[in-house]
Every structure is written in C-alpha cells, then in structure tokens.
Image: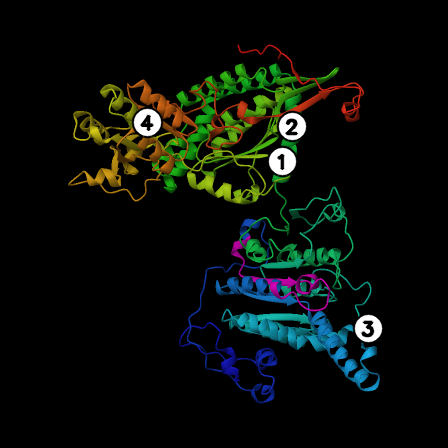
Amino acid sequence: MSCQAALNPLVRSPGWCFVLSPHAIAAVSRFYLPHHTQSLRNESIRCWSNIPFITMPLSRAHGKSFAHRSELKHAKRIVVKLGSAVVTRGDECGLALGRLASIVEQVSMLQNQGREMMIVTSGAVAFGKQRLRHEILLSQSVRQALHSGQSQLKDMAIPVLEARACAAAGQSGLMALYEAMFTQYSICAAQILVTNLDFHDEQKRRNLNGTLHELLRMNIVPIINTNDAVVPPPEPNSDLQGVNVISVKDNDSLAARLAVEMKTDLLIVLSDVEGLFDSPPGSDDAKLIDIFYPGDQQSVTFGTKSRVGMGGMEAKVKAALWALQGGTSVVIANGTHPKISGHVITDIVEGKKVGTFFSEVKPAGPTVEQQGEMSRAGGRTLAALQPEQRAEIIYRLADLLTDQREEILLANKKDLEEAENKGRLALPLLKRLSLSTSKLNSLAIGLRQIAASSQDSVGRIIRRTRIAKDLELEQVTVPIGVLLVIFESRPDCLPQVSALAIASGNGLLLKGGKEAAYSNQILHHLTQEALSIHGVKDAVQLVNTREEVEDLCRLDKLIDLIIPRGSSQLVRNIQKAAKGIPVMGHSEGICHVYVDTDASVEKVTRIIRDSKCEYPAACNALETLLIHRDLLRTPLFDQIIDMLRVEQVSWLLGLSLEVCDALDSPYKVKIHAGPKFASYLTFSPSEVKSLRTEYGDLECCIEVVDSVQEAVEHIHKYGSSHTDVIITENEKTAEFFLQHVDSACVFWNASTRFSDGYRFGLGAEVGISTSRIHARGPVGIEGLLTTKWLLRGDNHVVSDFSEHGSMKYLHENLPLPHRNTS
C-alpha cells in the first residue's frame, strides 16, 4: 500500500494539494504503512482524492465554554474520551466490538458533518491481554503435549500479565480495528501515542500540537492514547496545578489536557455510569446531577472507581473542571448502556439531556428538576387545603384577570408585534395568540364556574363497601400528582389549566411557546399571586429554562401525566418522546358532519357554517363533510356549496384588516373532493390527497356516502375519534348514528364546535382526549383525578376469613354521602 492510497478516503476539494509534515506522515504511516514507513517518512505528498468537503458553518471563537446544552450543536472541534469500561468486555479480556462499532459510526457521522473529531481511547491493555493469554495457552499446550501428555493440560496456569507488556501487544491490534471500522465510512484515522513527558517538553508539545492540527486540517480522525508500554507509574500529589498544568496520569487527564491544548469546543467523557450523582450510584437516594457547576464538589459523594481503568469518577470530575476552566465544555455520560450507547454521542451534540453537563453559568432560577419537586410538594399541600380554600384561590385568579386587564393586554401586544415582525406565525396561530377584553372576561367567567363546581372534587367518596363486621372500604378521589402541560400560541390556556389543576389539587408544570413569552409570564405571575393567599405558590411552575420538550418528556420520576395543547405534530412528537409517562390528548381533530336525506335545509347551512367557519383553526372544527348521495344536484347541496364559497369567517374580525392583508388570508372555504364525489362531477375541485387530513384552515373535504351505515364506516376508517355530527330530522337514523359512531363526542343537529369544556359546563378544559382509558372528550376537573382505596378495620387479618376461620365476607354496598351539586 502506498501513502497516497492510504490517504485517498480523505475528503478534499478538487484542485487543492497539501504538504504533510514529517510528524503527520509518521502518525498516518505508523498506522497504514508498516513495511514502507522509513522510505516515505521524509517525502511530501501532493496527490489527493478529488471528493469535495462536506462542510457546515460551525466555527466559533474559542475561549469560553458553552453556557447551555442547547448550544452544544454549534461545537466544531470535539474530543471523545472512551473509558476502559466502555471499550472492554465485561470479563476485561478483549474488546466490546459491537459497542465500539456504534461509537465509530457516531463519530464518523459527526466528522462527515464537517466537525473535527478526536478520540482518546483505552483498550490496548485489554486487547493485549487477550492476545497474550492466547499465545501463552498455545505455547504451554504445545510444550506440555510434548513433555507430559494431554492429561496435564487442564492443570495449566496462566501467569499474571504485566500491564505494559499487554499494552505493547495490544496497541497495534486496537488501531487496526479502528482503521477497519472507520474505513467503512470513508474516513482515515491516525494513531498518536503520548506520555506525560510529551507535554512537559516544549518542543514535543509544539510538535504534538502541529501534528494534530495538520491531521484535523486533512479531515483525519486522530486516535490518541497514553503510551502504556513505556509510561512510568503516576506520581503521587502531581494532580491539578492551576490552569496551565495538569498531570497526564490516566486517559481522563490526557483528554482534558488535549482538549485545552487543541482549544476544543466539547469534551465527551464516556464511562460506565450515567454521570454524576449526589450520592453513590445505586443507592436509594442517588439522583443524577443534570448540570454541574464549579464549586459543587461538596454536594457529590464519589463511589468506587470503575471495574477497569486507572481513574475513577473523582478523577473525571477534576479533569472535567480543569478543561472547563480552560474554555472547553464537558459532558460525562454512560457509554455502555445498551439502550442509549448507539446514539449517546450524537444525542449529546444535539443538546439532549444525557449525562452530566459541566457549566460555568448558573441559571437565574431553579432547574426544571427542582421545579418538578417544588410542584410535587406544593401540589400535596394544595390537595390538603379545604375545598373552600382552593375555590378561593381560583376566584382570586378570576378577579386578577379582569383587574389587571391592561397589563395583560400590553404584554400580549408585545408578543403579537414580535410575531408579526418576524412573520413566523400563520394566521390561525396568530389568532390563537391574540388576547382581548372579551377573551379575558370569558376566561374569568369560566374560572368562576370551575371554582363553584370544585367544592367536592378532591376526597369525594365514590364507593363504600362493608367487607366484614367493623371492616369498611372506601374508594375516594385524589389528584393525579404532577401534570406537565405543553401548549403553543395559547396564553389563555395558562389560567384555564392552572385553575383546573388548583381545583383538582394537582401540581402543575407549564411549558408555553416562546411566541407567547410575555403573555405567559404575566399570567403565571398572577396565578402565583392568587396561590399565595394560602401559601401554595410553588404548586404551579412555569418552565422558562432552555429545556427541550423531548427532555421534559423523560422526567418520569417527576411527572405523572403529560397534556399537550397545540398542533397535531406537537402532540405526535410528545407521544413519541414520552418515556414511561402517559400522554392525554389527541394527535388529530378530523371531525365529520354527515348530512342525511332527512336533514333540514335551515339547520344544514347554519351548522356547517358554524362548524367550519366560526374558528377553523380549532381542533373541533369540521374537516370532512359527508353528503348523502341522494342530495347531489339538489337545491340543498347548491346552498351548501354557495355558502362555503362566499362565507367570511367570523374569527378574522378580531384582527385588523392590515394584518389580514399582510398574511394574505382567503375569505372563502377551499373545497377538496373525495374520490366518490369527484366521480360524480365533470369539473371537480382538486381531489383530496388523503381523506385523513386535518386542515386547520378554511379548507374542507366533501365526500359522498350512500347511507348512514356507510357514513359511520367512513368515520371509523378515516376519523380520529374526536367529534362527529349527524344532521337529520329522522330520530331513528340519528339514534343509530349516536350509538354506533365510536368517538369521544357524537352530536345530533349541533355544531362540532360544542365539543369544548366551557360549553359543556366544565368551566374550562385541559384538552380533549380521544383515548379510551381514563378521561375521554373535553377533560375538566374529573379527568384530572384518580382514586385510592381506604380500608378501616379493627385487628382484622386474612387468616380469620379462611375456611375454618371465625369471620365471613359480607361485601355489602353502603350508601354514599350526599354530594353538593350547587
């Protein structure tokens, strides 16, 4: 193999040629050219592959570490340190090949994005130990077979292997393995062995620095390791000595030293634990520390070091803090867990909450984990209040919405102006973002309804049973726990959901869209002001940190239920991201209106107009209109089409004409033809791409059916089990529809828009659920409660109820206490 051939996989721009320094040639040649090293070492290479670079704008000024995880996506130069526990098998003899291949794949992916990747790897000792054991066994078996016969083979003992000898035997094999793996991704790798002396000698330091920079410039991945074949034992008390010096006595300190020397943006340290814990990992009270700040060492208790390797977690923390002080961001994470090791490196670079992130910038407020704990504690205190006290809080919030109207509308105006200036919101979302005096008044009315109806929501007895004499069982309502509500462009959602959480005694985490930041801030402030009258201010928390929604959905120890309020895409993303936390809601609102042959002309146009045009962005708006075949080419059908073509939507009236014109909003409903409807027409509207479409705008699909049975079948096949309507004067047909359509809400001669918690008399709703478990339809207070069982006895034991026991089961139903329904 020639040096040119070895370097052909490098990604270069056509027409460029480079001169390699002898140090760079040596690094590559050591790896690729075992038979021709000497003859090529002093040559200059000018011929390169003509494959162009894959680049991305990642450059940033070095000198200060990233303050937040979300900024890690901008990291250009990255060091990945692979601990011994990550690289080696559980028996410490040989390499974990599958895990190593996954790491190489992730590093290659980032390298091909235009980043500069470096690897500090362990594993030479383990790989050498495997090879030497094999050689010793082989030589011993041959000698003993010649001298003693086969009977003594089983008594062979393998001598203790010296680590430096193992490293010498394993280094070449380890690098050959890396080369074979990186070649699969058309990436070249180069080996660099260092010792502590290489950093103390200024000339060697400059040579090392120049070699690494040149390799990175040529799109080569440097693979660095301490030269364990010759490295002396670490000196005691030679650890951190300020910003400029760190003793290289293991691969953790080596990675930190390299990261600072090379001015890298990010150091990823992979070990066999998830990160830093406030107690030894595995103990009952151990909690993973999401963000670690300099000076927090006293809050961490270090356990024993990993099963292999020279450094423990304490060494990793010291090295990480030294690198952080030098301007490099650091993440310590688990590289061995089978569920996450396949994407742990890419997840870290994408800013996901993996491992422990080291930061010099402490947030102004509590972390989301702390907010979750505060909400849990506040919710339990809230649930322990008297019903009248919880109602008093909600009444106070309703008063604040009207008393502080001017401040609320001023904050909302800022949100609207920013949204309009940036042009980032479609008209339906802009309408959702807008608050008005009438909206605030309606909110206040709804909150007072919630307060009035919540008097006996928590602690209500729903079942009483006498199990036996003096043994009574009760089933009572209790809060679910901590709710996470994620909402888009809907600031009015905040007081609604807060009131429902307060009434049901739940703790609440709120994550609003950044487009409503000013509105959410003042509404949350007013909510906490109302909560303060009974000392439960912490029960409702607004998440203002840079936490991604996906990261919030992983907090299964803090959150009991997630409720998304927003687009179908948001709901689907949350349902996909939630790990171990139930999600209440609906991903789509594909609502149908079926017009039967016996429908009233007057009712048809009014109900369709209201269902589609009153607020087309709502999840309960009409999306598919089903027409009985016999109504085609009738005056009623013509009236429906004419109404849809000329109808001006009422919800536009809340916005200025200038805003509407700027957003280029249509003033009529665009019609899409279903397949059967299109077959009846010579010139049809555009044929629908899918009958399972939620438009969320002034658009709808029209399809033809032959009967009410076919309408029900169509709804079950293409609907989303949200809200479906029949318009007919035939009671028998209507009852068939009501009983057979399997949706959360099924109406007869009423608009789909009635599917709403306020209109149902619930005061408000946290959302509409299409689930078949727990709550379904508009979810008010009842949907935010679960139950627990209370058993009151007097020295009862199960053995008393055995065949020869002294007691018998009665299982008598007992009357329930009177419920206050005023």
Instruction: Answer with mark 4 or mark 1, whichever residue precedes in sequence.
Output: 1
Of residues 640 and 498, the one nearer the viewer is 640
> Helix or strand or loop: what does disc 1 sit on?
helix
Q: Nearer the viewer, mark 3 or mark 1?
A: 3
Residue drawn at (73%, 76%), measured in percent from left and top?
Answer: 134
Mark 3 and 2 residues: CB-CB less than 8 Å, in contact? Answer: no
Question: How far separated are the C-alphas under marks 3 and 1?
Answer: 52 Å
SS of the residue under disc 3: loop
Amino acid marked by disc 2: Gly
Q: Quadrant of residue 17?
A: bottom left
Residue under numbered circle 1? 372
Q: Earlier in the sequence, mark 1 or mark 2?
A: 1
Q: Is residue 59 left or right of residue 598?
A: right
Q: Residue furthest front?
A: 804
- Identified by mark 1, the residue type is Gly
Residue count near mark 3 (Cα–Cα under 10 Å), binned few <14, some 14–19, many ≥20: few
Q: Which residues are magenta?
A: 72-98
Q: Of the residues under marks 3 and 2, which one precedes in the sequence?
A: 3
Q: Residue at x 62, y 11 (%)?
A: 817
Q: Amino acid at mark 4?
A: Ser
Please state the horizontal and vertical placement of residue 795, each as a whole percent of the image.
81, 20
Q: Earlier in the sequence, mark 3 or mark 4?
A: 3
Q: In the rendered structure, are the residues bearing label 2 and label 4 in contact, judged by CB atoms less than 8 Å apart? A: no
**Left or right, residue 229 beside residue 563:** right
Residue hosting label 3: 160
Which of the two labelled residues, at mark 2 and mark 4, occupies the earlier sequence position?
2
Dot 4: what SS? helix
